[in-house]
Image (cartoon, helix red, strand yellow):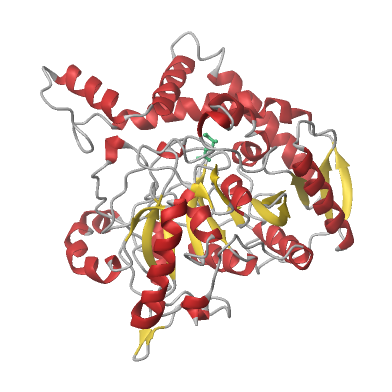
Amino acid sequence: MLDELEPWSGLLSDPKRRAAYEAYAEGWEGRIGAFLQFSPDEPAGRRGAGQAAAKPAARLAAAGPAGRDPAEPAAAPTTEQGPTGALALVPFAVKDNIAVEGFRMTCGSRILEDYRPPYTATCVARLQAEGALVVGKTNLDEFGMGSSCDNSAFARTSNPYDSALVAGGSSGGSAAAVAAGLVPFALGTDTGGSVRQPANFCGVYGLKPSYGAVSRFGLAAYASSLEGAGVLGRSIDVVEEVFRAMVGVDPLDQTTVAGPGRPGTEAAEPKSVGVVRGLGGLDPAVEAAYRGALAALADSGLRLVELDLPMLDYVLPAYYTIATAEASANLARYTGIAYGRRCAGAENPDDLVRRSRGEGFGDEVKLRVLVGTFVLRSGFQDRYYHKAQTLRRAIRDELAGALREVDLIAMPVFPTQAFAHGDSGMDQFQQKMADKFTCTANLAGLPALAVPTGLSGGLPTGIQLLAASFREDRLFSCARRLAPAFPLPEPPSFSREFLR
Ligand code: GLN
């Protein structure tokens, strides 16, 4: 087990340390609201109850690569001394659009307020198989739609560095929980930046793996061709460890592939980093931090190569056309009939569906379903959806070409630091316009990593690295080179006392 995870192992079963931990978590939760459910007791309590419910998924599953059914609840390797996996008895948190048996899965939406999934997502099950323990489910923008966490139907999550500011989104709860030291790592999902942007706002690492590297089984679908599960952590070693435990083919997700260049199999130190020419519109603090990070990359021995990526101008229209189109189709399953919220006193089936959806979805979700339905309308598809797919291909090809010339591409994560909650911050449209740097990797299916680079004006800054598909190893080794220049920041009142 990694040295830095050791102190976390067994924390929950040691009454003294656990009491101190819960008091620490409670203090933070009052200020940041990272969790929708915090129940460190759940793991022990739910095993028996969950077993029967897990069976249907288990029946569907073929045996996983390790001979283990990926949908089965954890069977951590044990000896008489207890679990022995790489994450044995280490607590972690999971974004609330990822299924964990025994916990609710609300997706931050009223429509799933009381929904309890009868199975566990493969990415979580694989961590449980290494002995890790889910302590709770974290807040998010409804169905992952947003960049602030303010779009959650239940709560707002605040930034651990300043509670007047957002934690970012949509995986803001996971980012805030990791930054505050409530868990050593957390899972999020990233469709257009939802792991990297909140990681950047909260000063932690955020990895979006290659499309197809980590199973999406058990993730609530928003935009299936863009999204995947990602990791937020306080060190690159922890992020890599968690990624290694999750990665791999899953018979329950036909888009998973055993890509080339798995970390360890083809490892070669990156030598060059492409730097995109002429990036405008960055806040001065972000611009300065970005320049500083580029200088640190050069100091670490990497060759910086200027790049032109003209297709970047088309990332946002392509992303928001495809993401809304897929969302409108994916969210059609919430009818109030099979599961989720059902309105009272419907007159007929149409009325039931209309009112259940009307009451259950928030404004941002409704907007996206409408836009998605519009771009997919017959007669309009060529004008919007097909054009967006053509752009996506061109963006992909341009990046693939660039990544044949250089080992990595560096970009900012987001043009601003954490912004204020509500109306005084960025409006929904400004937030979408600011997704340009993160959505790029999702359209191209590339792995990308947000690396924290310290504080400016008391708030975290960072840089984003992109690599060719299945070259996460290059992201990890580059982040390791940067780490000495940028010790991880700690928010005020951060403590590790309870681990002693
Ligand atoms: N801001 C992006 C969006 O709202 C991020 C989504 C995500 O990665 N889940 O679509």
Residue at 39 percent across and 43 percent down: it is 155
The residue that appears at 27% across and 53% down in the rendered structure is 60
Is residue 81 shown above or below 93?
below
Q: Position of residue 104 (x, y in %)?
A: 28, 51
- Residue at 34% across, 52% down: 99
The location of residue 330, given as percent across then percent down, is 38, 32
Q: Looking at this view, is 81 or 423 the one in front? A: 423
Q: Is residue 248 visible?
A: no
Judge whether residue 207 can be spotted in this image. Answer: yes
- The quadrant holding residue 243 is bottom right
Tally of numbered discs:
0
Q: Nearer the viewer, residue 301 or 257?
A: 301
State left or right for residue 176 relative to residue 350: right
Position of 23 with respect to 421 (left or right) is left
Q: Position of residue 494 (x, y in %)?
A: 56, 66
> Looking at the image, is 235 positioned above or below residue 139?
below
Relative to 360, residue 74 above or below: below
